[in-house]
Image (cartoon, grey):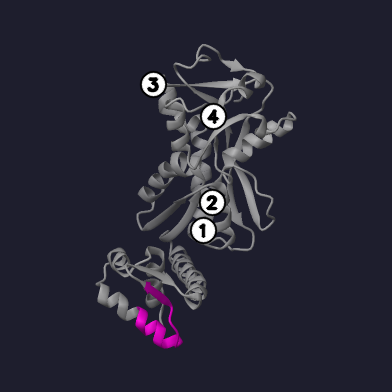
Amino acid sequence: MDLWQLKVFKTVVDQKGFSKAANAIHLTQPTVSSHIRELEDYFDCQLIDRLGRQALPTKAGERLYAYAERLLTLFDETETAIREFLGKISGRITIGGSTIPGCYLLPSVIGSFIKQFKDVHVSLIVGDTERVVDDLLNYKLELGVVGAKTPDKRLIQERLIEDNLRLIIPSDHKWAGRKQISLEMLSSEPFIVREPGSGTLTSVQHSLARIGFDIKNLRVVAEMGSTAAVIQGIKNHVGVSILSPIAVEDELKSGTLKALTIEKMDLKRYFYLTLHKDRAASPLCRAFCDFLKERIISTAPRRPGRG
């Protein structure tokens, strides 16, 4: 058994197929199959169930997958550490972002980072806050940026940037001429929520709870699994919703959507840099964290009254 065989095995499981795995790592399908057979011979058990065109791990394969992930991550960290010792920032890093930072903030930071450090490969996994937290706890990610605090003491979080959620409505809505509405007005309007596990939903629930209001008292007509879907729902008059203005910046500039405040509701939240407390950050991870914080500080809007 060697690390390359584990890499091939992990890719087959990730891609759920031999041909897709072969394309992903630029091998022929017979070569991929040969590596898997060698691993199965080594452990004297079946690791992959071949179900038609789909390949799924057996129970033994699931156990091996967890260790393969850790070994391959440690290998990447080892390479990165030695290269840093030699004065080079290089290697691979996998980071996670909940919907808003993952889709609207991190891509530009990653672009600038890899322009500066050309021997670095960054993988960005985008999911809701709950998924990013789970992946951090299971060592699938080195760092994450999410839009909600987590109570799990195994993770450490640092505030990165402030975000002020707003009620987003179509430009032809009856409230389009207003800057603010009351919570009583919102209670009677069709409302779209994000799915459970979303940082945006968690922030909205907490904001409502602080003023003694339960989100169940809103007229929820739809639950949608992504910010993009919610935006389309608003544009197509399914309902209104509370979102980050970052996600609808273009629509607000063009005037197709409007952003309002809600009386007595504090919708301020933060995006958090999130790391596993028990996982030593690799040199590449530390370099990216420093770069991210510098970039966020340099691009953050200056507040009135500050020098």
Which residue is identified by label 4? 241
Which residue is identified by label 3? 254
Marks 3 and 2, how far apart in space? 31 Å
- Horizontal side of 31 relative to 13 (left or right) equals left
Q: Quadrant of residue 161?
A: top right
Indicate which disc, 1 or 4, sits on the residue closer to the N terminus. 1
Which residue is identified by label 2? 144
Indicate which disc, 4 or 3, sits on the residue closer to the N terminus. 4
> Which one is closest to the eye, mark 1 or mark 4?
4
Which residue is identified by label 1? 141
Marks 1 and 4, how far apart in space? 31 Å
Residue 269 appears at what percent x and percent y?
Answer: 62, 35
Does the CB distance between marks 2 and 1 fall below 8 Å? Answer: yes
Q: Secondary structure at mark 3?
A: helix
Give the camera-side residue of 112 and 106: 106
Marks 2 and 1, how far apart in space? 7 Å
